[in-house]
Image: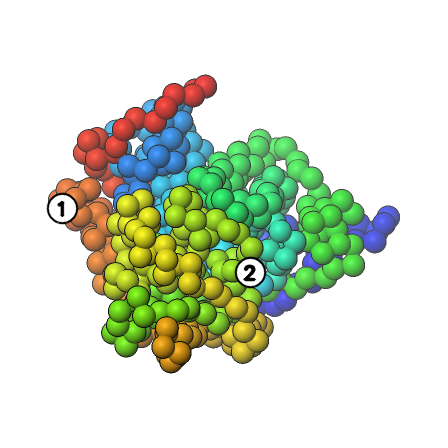
Amino acid sequence: MREHEVRTHPPGRPTPREEQLAWKLAALAADRVPEGPEVVETIINRLIDNAGVAVAALNRAPVASARAQALAHPRPGGATVFGLSNDVTVHCEWAAWANGAAVRELDFHDNFFALESSHPGDTIPPLLAVAQQCRRSGRDLVRAVATAYEVQVDLAKGIPLNPYRIDHIAHLGPAQAAGLCALLDLPVETAYQAIQHAAHVSVSTRQARKGAISSWKAHAPGHVGKLAIEAVDRAMRGETSPSPAYEGEYGLIAQLLGGPEAAWRVPLPDPGESKRAILETFTKEYSAGYHGQAAIDLAFRMRERIGDPERIERIVLHTKRLSHLVMGAGANDPEKWDPDASRETLDHSLMFIFAVALQDGTWHHERSYAPERVRRPDTVRLWRQITTVEDPDWNRRYDGRPPLERDHGMRAVVTFTDGTTLSEEIAVADAHPRGARPFRREDYVRKYTSLAEGVVEPGESERFLDLVRRLPELEAQEIRALNVQVDPARLGPAAPSGIF
């Protein structure tokens, strides 16, 4: 790996093209390097994970809405849509939109944390959709996913977005475009234009994850996936894009990400070096924002020692700055204690998550968020006795460390009505690579199976799992069947009509 400085060029002295970040990302996308067994294994795990969380969300309103929009754009020989028959195909950009929403809706797949956070699994839906429509092989898809993860992770290591209140999908669009260019084996010049286009149009504000969080959180990855596909299509037709997207005087760095004096360092593999960034990512065991994963495990551990929750006077969760600001009291969002808040808001409330996990000793992607469960008086009372504080020690255990060495946990201090206290901490979630039960292939299959139960027929699940396990060997026709089909009755009510 080598770090590449990214900064605004001085007036009248444009950055040579070969030194621009977009060009270097394009060269990475065009560099055909074999993927090692560990990388291939992890890519297959990610496809299994995406499929499981997607089928569990098929009957939810945001997913039904995106699916209805996709179905308004049929294309023979196009791409499949999660849950529908493999005989039903739509334009690939609309499949990316619908499938991206299905994967993201439950906030239940993989993560990466460095200078910026991300959900790299969001890169996969547009890659799979284009692979299906353009008749690419399993080996092509493996190369594309490895490339997209590499770009997503390396950008998150080098350029922060959250401090400037830019949503993390700003790094997702360029990653998706780079993966698509690798999938289609496009030349560096074409990839350069496509990546710049995608970077230019993928920027939105962090309000998407603030206050009363809306259903847009589920749609955002599919939106930029759709834009990335359009960017690549346009570049393939010989069109150019705003340049230099990152280093220009009016570019992303100068105007949005630190200003003209800012300098960021993005690590990228050298030519011929394997793309292994996916190995630094990890999934969720529970359907909640990542900062809540360790909170759930900690609450489970403390239940027996705490006993009757009615004895609790207050609970303070000592944690890192990011958790406190994004999912804790530091967000200053009263919605995070509101029993009438949206599901998207609740899965980003550490206080809610800890209260329910403590009371129930289990976590479920539907039952834990059911309105009657959320509004239980004893739950609301306990929930409002919980707060978070930023703790310098937890900042030290997180900030500036290599991604897999960061502690994502917290220390819970429980004060009882009799004045006694109880304290316990957890460094990382149990499913984290450093946790008590790191996820392996069998865990991904178990997670998929539990989410597919009652939604997908067992024979269909077996067909999909057998197919995805052979991913590198799949021919184009088999890639077209890399989808999970369900009984239409399992899809829930039809979405309201719109323009399409």
Q: Quadrant of residue 125?
A: top left
Kindly identify the residue that appears in the image at 37 percent across and 58 percent down: 381
Identify the residue position indicated by label 2 in the image. Answer: 330
SS assignment at label 2: helix
Identify the residue position indicated by label 1 in the image. Answer: 458
Q: Residue furthest top?
A: 499
Residue 106: image x %, image y %? Answer: 36, 48
Kindly identify the residue that appears in the image at 43 percent across and 64 percent down: 386
Kindly identify the residue that appears in the image at 20 percent across and 53 percent down: 449
Above or below residue 474? Residue 354 is below
Residue 42: image x %, image y %? Answer: 35, 61
Q: Nearer the viewer, residue 52 or 346?
A: 346
Residue 404 bears which disc, if any? none
Q: Amino acid at mark 1?
A: Pro
Residue 444: in sight, yes or no?
A: no
SS assignment at label 1: helix
Q: Quadrant of residue 350?
A: bottom left
Kindly identify the residue that appears in the image at 40 percent across and 52 percent down: 347
From the image, which quarter does the N terminus lie in?
bottom right
Above or below residue 119? Residue 102 is above
Q: Nearer the viewer, residue 82 or 196?
A: 82
Q: Amino acid at mark 2?
A: Gly
Residue 279: image x %, image y %? Answer: 42, 65
From the image, which quarter does the C terminus lie in?
top left
Above or below residue 312? Residue 167 is above
